[in-house]
Image (tube, grey):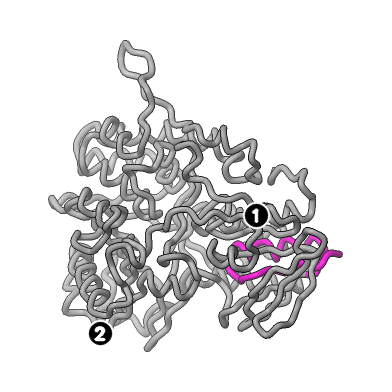
Amino acid sequence: MARIVVIGAGMGAMAAAARLAVAGHRVAVYERSGTYGGGLGRLARDGFVFDTGPGLLHLPAVYRDLFVKTGKESLEQSLEMVQVDPAARHVFADGTSFALPDASRAGVVAALDAAVGAGAGERWSELMVRAREVWDATRRPLLEEPLRPERVGPLGQDPYPAPRRRGLLRRAAPATLAQVGARELKDPRLVALLEGHALAHGLDPRTAPASATVLPYMEQTFGTWYVRGGLRGLAEALYERCRARRVEFFFGAEAVDVVEKDGRAAGVRLAGGEVIEADAVVAGVAPERLAALAPGAGQPAGPVAAGRFSVFLALRGARPAGTAHRTVVHAPDRAAELEGVFGARGGTAHLPTVTVLRPDDAGTRPDDGHEAVTLTATVAPQGRGVDWTDAATAAAWAQRMIEAAGAAVEDLGERVLWREVRTPADTERGTGAAGGGVPAPVLAGAQGAFLRPGTATPLPGLYRVGGFAHPGGGLAHAGMSGALAAGLIVEGAGFRGSQ
């Protein structure tokens, strides 16, 4: 039985802790804040409840596997999950709108043909067929296996296939997601649909590799899921699973140093000076914090990721029957938006793409005469052309998002009882991530520019988990990172990933 110290109680860290405990190790988690779950936070006020992080789950199989491997109760026995259908409604500045059914290729084709024009659905469907080739080529080496130096080169090659044209051989594959959209979709609404998936993950479609087509493919193929009472319930279920496996949690306990002995990680030193000895250390923290904890860990800083701005709205009036759970209101000027979010100067001069979440869930509202609505937008990180700590700036941006969301929520301005906001500056304070950046999932291609540091660090005995480690950001990817860390600790350097 080894002694394992886990720094942080985020989803990747808890996923690793549960798996390590089941393997017979003694696991202790040290979290500097007062709670668990990392980005899966909750805001509760006056009977309204909001997720302050992700509101939907994709690739639920990751957590199904985790719960199967760590206890008798399945994921569905531990919480109530519902499939969201339609997966999303999309609204465009020209008045076009359509709802895409969940996990239904034929339904998506029909919806796009009806709203955009004959042939639109087939063009999208053909794109998803090519995206499936990306998924098949990269699922295991990119998501399920530890990232080793010899794999970086091959994963730097983009597996997205170039389409054939009548009478022609395959042309050169597009280098970026934006080029995929321009060449293969053509219609600006379909292009916005494709690029919107990248933007939601904090990726710039002008620089993201063509392999980013795998993002809408995964959502369309494996479905979109919601947890009754809010996605915070997933964090609660995983925390309880860890406790059932006798993982110890210490909150308000900040690790300030990774202790080294004989050239390997041998524990952590807490803020009060106490040293906790361990045979291995798992760090679920942002790169900046890991660099401070273990300067020899070799964590490259990389570019600051895009941030996320959220507005939580308590509304008077009932949620109308038939309302879509998720509506994406697309920006009228995509080029201006991308420059504002990802450009060197950044800023807030553009109008944003706003995702509107309206769950049909009595657990999120005080009664049926009210509604809890969450608005989110991808924005420039703190300090890139905008100071999100400035109250006037944050308030003005929140109002701009509310005005945009009016295209999805009837009489929105008149229904607001109160609102609260979360900015990238709040994220930076809570996580230590530079600029409050939210990490994106890893992608193949672009010579490895969209990969994350591997699970194992240059310091033996120290392992990374969470969105800033391989295989990147997102709830499902966090769960995968925990599986990789546990596998390397239990099986050693020969671990090849889940089967």
For label 2, the SS is strand
Residue 94 higher or lower than 26, as above or below: above
The one of 124 and 209 positioned closer to us in this rendering: 209
**Residue extending furthest left?**
94
Q: Does the magenta stretch include residue 11?
A: yes
Number of numbered discs: 2
Q: How far apart are marks 1 and 2 (CA)?
A: 41 Å
In percent of width and height, residue 177 lies at: 35, 39
In percent of width and height, residue 328 lies at: 28, 57
Q: Which residue does the image show at 24% across and 38% down from the upper left?
A: 113
For label 1, the SS is helix
In percent of width and height, residue 75 lies at: 61, 62
Q: Which residue does the image show at 30% across and 15% down from the upper left?
A: 166
Which residue type does callout 1 highlight?
Asp
Q: Give the range drawn in magenta.
A: 1-26
Q: Is residue 5 magenta?
A: yes
First in residue order: circle 1 vs circle 2: 1
Residue 60 shown left or right of residue 253 in the figure: left
Which residue type does callout 2 highlight?
Leu
Residue 324 higher or lower than 38, as above or below: above
Quadrant of image for the C terminus: top right
Q: Quadrant of residue 268?
A: bottom right
Q: In which quarter of the image is residue 234?
A: bottom right
Residue 268 higher or lower than 485, as above or below: below
**Can you see residue 313?**
yes
The one of 24 and 221 positioned closer to us in this rendering: 24
Q: How crowded is mark 2: few (under 14 residues within 10 Å), some or many (20 or more)?
A: few
Q: Residues within 10 Å of mark 1 (few under 14, many from 20)?
A: some
Report the disc number at residue 417.
Answer: 2
Residue 114 shown left or right of residue 305 in the figure: left
Report the disc number at residue 65.
Answer: 1
Quadrant of image for the N terminus: bottom right
